[in-house]
Amino acid sequence: MTMQLSERAKKLIPKARIVSFATWKNLYSDEVIAIFQEADNRSEYLTDEDLESIQNLVPDTSLMLAQVRLLREQAPNLVANARAKVLTDFPNIAEPGNDLYPPARAEACWRDFWHFLRSVTYGIAGNNPEFLSQEGLENMDLLYQELRVPVPAMLCGLEQLKTVSLQQFSSEEQDLLGLNFDHLIGALKQFSQA
C-alpha cells in the first residue's frame, strides 16, 4: 500500500534537505566539500572511494573516516535497533488508526532514521557537527506537520540510534561523536510537534 501525499507534502519533500556544508567553506577546500555534497545529492553514505579521496585530501581525518565506515556498515542493525525501541516505547504506534499506520508510513519513518544516521556520518567525517541546513530543517518541520509524523517517537528512535551507534566506540570517542547526534537531536526538538 502506498501513501497518498498531498500537493503540499510533494512540494515540501525536495525542500526538506537537512544537510548543508555552507559553514565548512573556511575548513575545507571546494574539492573536499564537493565529495560530501555529491554523496548527499545521491542520498547515500560516503563510499569507500569517497572516504579514500577525503583522506588523501585531508590526511588527519583517518580516525573519523574509520568511524564513519563502521557506522555505515552497521547502519541496518543500528536503524533496526532504533525501530525496535520506538515500537517498544510506543507499542501501538503501527496499529490501524495510529500514527505509523499504514505500514508505508512506518517504513518512511524507519527510512528517516537511516537518513539521519547518514547525515550524522557526514558531520563525523568532516569532524564538524555543524552540518545542518536551517532552511531544510524548517521545511522538514512543515513536512512532518503535514504528514502528521509523530515527532516524539522520532526523537525516541533518534536517541536510540545515538545510543547504539556510540556503543561501537570508546568513551573518549563517544564524547566527540555524540556532538553530531546531539546537534541533530537538538534541531528535531525544536519541531512544532516535539
Image (tube, rainbow, N blue to C red):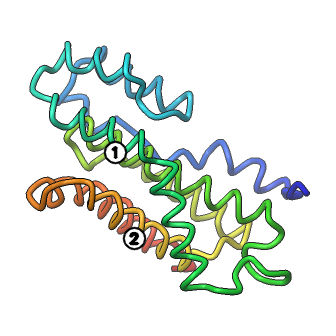
Q: Is residue 66 left or right of residue 17?
A: left
Q: Residue 151: x, y in percent?
A: 56, 74
Up-down relation of residue 52 to residue 83 (above or below): above
Mark 2 Cα within 10 Å, few/some/many (few <14, many 20+)?
some
Amino acid on which the number 2 mark rests in the picture: Glu
Badge number at residue 66: none
Mark 1 Cα within 10 Å, few/some/many (few <14, many 20+)?
many
Marks 2/1: CA distance? 18 Å
Residue at coordinates 88% horizontally, 54% vertically from top-left?
2
Residue at coordinates 41% horizontally, 40% vertically from top-left?
72
Up-down relation of residue 10 to residue 193 (above or below): above
Report the front residue among 30 and 99.
99
Q: Residue 163: x, y in percent?
A: 33, 67
* Quadrant in the rendering for residue 78: bottom left
Q: Residue 99: x, y in percent?
A: 73, 78
- In the rendered image, the quadrant that contains the N terminus is bottom right
Report the front residue among 136 and 167.
167
Count of numbered circles on the image: 2
Residue position for label 1: 131
Amino acid on which the number 1 mark rests in the picture: Phe
Residue position for label 2: 159
Q: Could you tell which of marks 2 and 1 lies nearer the N-terminus?
A: 1
Q: Is residue 95 left or right of residue 66?
A: right
Q: Secondary structure at mark 2?
A: helix
